[in-house]
Amino acid sequence: MVYEFGWRDRLLPGTCILCGTASGQPRDLCTPCANDLPWNEHGCPRCAMPLPDAQSAACGHCLSKAPHFAACVAALRYTYPVRQLISRFKFNADLASGRLLSQLLVQRLITLGAPAPGEFVLVPVPLHPRRRSERGFNQAERIARIVAHGLRQNLQAGLVERVRQTPDQKNLTAAARRANLRGAFRAGSCAGLRVALIDDVVTTGATADAISAAMLTAGAREVRVWCLARAI
């Protein structure tokens, strides 16, 4: 069952989702736990791959083979406790975890320089209808709705379709992931749009790259990726 939050939830004091103490603020995260999160402070500006220190140049992989998307922002690194929160969100319909992580993505984007209202069209990474039916919701769409509201951007959830169900990519190499996704996505008209593609986790970037290519072919002016976390 997917639990929807209503006005009663917003009236209750926040409780930290990680340690269980009163958060002292509207979101479900206390300051000490927030400070201990694995923020992706130093990432490749093109693909958000975590790097040891800040640098303006893209990572070696992006320099040798640039992805179709222009930039990627990942709020966090995909490690403890972020990995566990995302898993609870995706597979246990824990919307409190998803809401918190989405709020952290909004916070990170504001810190980096919030886009002007309506500057981007937000497009969630689509699930195949069969996968969506099994899960009951699309986690990327949930994230996109919170980010769109927080940054005053437009949302077009149906702009890209997943037209072919692909095998699980968890144990595939980067090359195998790219081959697996070939022809899996179809984009509607994106003429002149600046798109922010929304996802929960970027692992190799293969999914984001395939969708970005489809949207650029459909006329998008630019595609960026905004995600909760980047795999290390």
Image: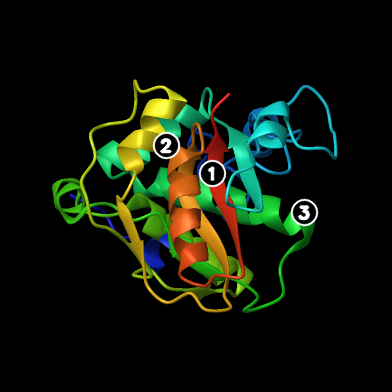
Circle 3 residue: 112
Residue 19 visible here:
no
Q: Amino acid at mark 2?
A: Ile
Nearest the camera: 144 or 26? Answer: 144
Q: Earlier in the sequence, mark 1 or mark 3?
A: 3
SS type, badge 2: helix
Residue 32 visible here:
yes
Left or right, 209 with respect to 5, comes to right
Query: Whole-percent x and y of residue 92?
Result: 26, 38
Quarter of the view holding residue 153: bottom right
Q: Amino acid at mark 1?
A: Leu
Measure the C-alpha gap from mark 1 to mark 3.
15 Å
Q: Amino acid at mark 3?
A: Leu
Nearest the camera: 224 or 31? Answer: 224
Residue lying at 39% horizontally and 69% vertically, measured from the top left? 7
Residue lying at 28% horizontally and 52% vertically, measured from the top left? 127
Q: Which mark is residue 90?
A: none
Query: Local crowd at mark 1 within 10 Å, few (<14), some, or many (≥20)?
Result: many
Q: Earlier in the sequence, mark 2 or mark 3?
A: 2
**Is the residue 95 above or below the residue 180 in the image?**
below
Q: Residues at badges 2 and 1 in contact (C-beta under 8 Å)?
A: yes
**Is the residue 151 above or below the residue 105 in the image?**
below
Circle 2 residue: 86
Circle 1 residue: 228
Query: Whole-percent x and y of residue 226?
Result: 57, 52
* Camera-side mark, 2 or 3: 3
SS type, badge 3: helix
Query: Whole-percent x and y of residue 196?
Result: 56, 61
Left or right, 94 with respect to 195, comes to left
Residue lying at 60% horizontally and 48% vertically, measured from the top left? 104
Total numbered badges shown on the rendered structure = 3
Query: Local crowd at mark 3 within 10 Å, few (<14), some, or many (≥20)?
Result: few
